[in-house]
Amino acid sequence: MGNRKETFANGEYYHICNRGIEGRNIVMDKRDADRFVVCLAEFNTVEPVGSLYLLSFEIKKGKSKKKLVDIVAYCLNPNHFHIILRQKVDGGISEFVKRLSGGHAWYFNKKHKRKGPLFQGHFRAKHITNNNHLLHASVYVNLNDLVHQLSGETAKLVRSSWNQYERKVQGICSPNAIVSQFKTRKDYLEFAKDALAGMIEKRAKYKELKEILLEE
């Protein structure tokens, strides 16, 4: 992963994203996708992890419950992922993403008999500086597959935290920072529905603009 110029502050929220190198898929089947989600939980510990742990196919249990980050929302698409993180300890975000990306890349390469980097360079990080940004980012990340309008076999590889927001099921996320701002869960779902529609519309207009500029 290398060193980053960004400094992540404890208690602050960040939108994290990384893509497969040259646009390639980072998950090929349901097992890959499910394992990625397990890693979101299992790598989120302040305890050090050695190379054997990082590279292991089997996820060890019984680690410390003290976390590097709070995972607010996530979406894994076949060729990239988005996560909203709140840093809990110094260096937590960098360490967490390093473990997640490194561990998944080794597993993926071993399983699919490939070599070389799986992700394109450094992960991207955007500081979420206000509450309105946080609320809309939660929708963008939770429903990112719908923003990109994925369907068919591709959609079967999507994994996200949306169920935790929609149905209040147990999971690896901490959605309370978002959902608690609404009178009812239904109110958040209505907000998400409207926000998603706006995002899809803006994305379509942006695509049209790019096509026009290319034609010119």
Image (cartoon, grey):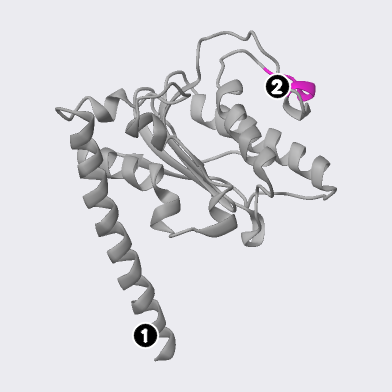
Secondary structure at badge 1 equals helix
Magenta span: predominant SS is helix
Amino acid tagged 2: Ile
Q: Which portion, as a residue range, is magenta?
A: 49-53
Q: Nearer the viewer, residue 96 or 148?
A: 148
Q: In which quarter of the image is residue 198?
A: bottom left
Residue reaching furthest to the bottom? 216
Mark 2, secondary structure of its residue: loop
Q: Which of marks 2 and 1 is in front?
A: 2
Horizontal relation, residue 37 to residue 58: left or right: left
Q: Is residue 199 left or right of residue 158?
A: left
- Residue 92, percent from left and from top: 50, 24
Residue for point 33% across, 34% down: 166
Q: Position of residue 63 (x, y in %)?
A: 62, 10
Amino acid at pointer 1: Ile
Q: Residue at x 55, y 58 (%)?
A: 152
- For the residue pair 55 and 130, the one nearer the viewer reads as 55
In the picture, the disc for residue 212 is 1
